[in-house]
Amino acid sequence: MLMSTLWGVVSPLMGLFYAGIQVMVPCLPPAPLSTAVINTDEYMGSWYFVAAAAWEEDDLKSFKTTDSSILHIQKGANDILTVTETIRIGDQCQKNTWSYFALSVMDPFLFRTDFDTIVLIWDGKLINCPSCIIILFVDEDEEVSAMLFARNEKTPDEVIQEFKSKMECVYMEEFLKAPLKNGHEQMQRSSRCRSTINY
């Protein structure tokens, strides 16, 4: 109760502080989406991986073998989000499933249930793409990456360039675009994906 009360006081102050910083650094993204917004139907369903950016090249190493990736977000009981990622690496297909939850006193952060990853999500207004989201991942090794996802399989080059430009403005100069050599369609139709469920 005390933590909730304190956060209720501190959170608006942090929002005002961030707004002030944005005046001085205009390229900073707006405040992330609240967990209440993320849990609406607007953000459920499939999202196609488009590109990723990071401060350090090593933070993108896990993406370098990825040809394509699709996230499927589904709302479960108690506002738990089930996130299934279907990845194509070469000729192989793999599915990983994780669960994420929110703490009201830590909004807008989302936490993976194994506490290995923390997530923040922005809508695509930052890059003039209403059908996009940007997800910032911080993993257990403190590797940080920003990933661009879109509702459509094909994302205009100008959207990708705008994402790259915005990330460079906050010094995320390491950039990687999904190769899509095998495309999404073949992966979606594959029934031979190896599945891993993480709790």
Image (spheres, helix red, strand yellow):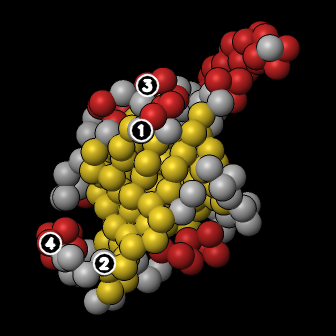
Spatial separation of the CA atoms under disc 2 and disc 1:
23 Å
Q: Earlier in the sequence, mark 2 or mark 1?
A: 1
Residue at 23 percent of width and 55 percent of height: 155
Q: Amino acid at mark 3?
A: Val
Spatial separation of the CA atoms under disc 3 and disc 1:
15 Å
Q: Secondary structure at mark 3?
A: helix
| Classed neighbour count for the residue bearing mark 2: other residues with Cα under 10 Å, few (<14), some (14–19), many (≥20) | some
Find residue 37 and name its label. 3
Q: Residue 49 location in percent, x, y?
A: 34, 60
Q: Amino acid at mark 2?
A: Cys
Find residue 189 and name its label. 4
Spatial separation of the CA atoms under disc 2 and disc 3:
31 Å
Q: Nearer the viewer, residue 53 or 26?
A: 53
Residue at 80 percent of width and 14 percent of height: 1
Nearer to us of marks 4 and 1 is 1
Q: Nearer the viewer, residue 165 or 89?
A: 89
Residue at 30 percent of width and 78 percent of height: 193
Q: Amino acid at mark 4?
A: Arg
Q: Earlier in the sequence, mark 3 or mark 1?
A: 3
Identify residue for label 1. 76
Q: Secondary structure at mark 2?
A: loop
Nearer to us of marks 4 and 3 is 4
Q: Earlier in the sequence, mark 2 or mark 3?
A: 3
Identify residue for label 2. 193
Instruction: Farthest residue to the right: give it.
Output: 2
Q: Residue 67 location in percent, x, y?
A: 33, 78
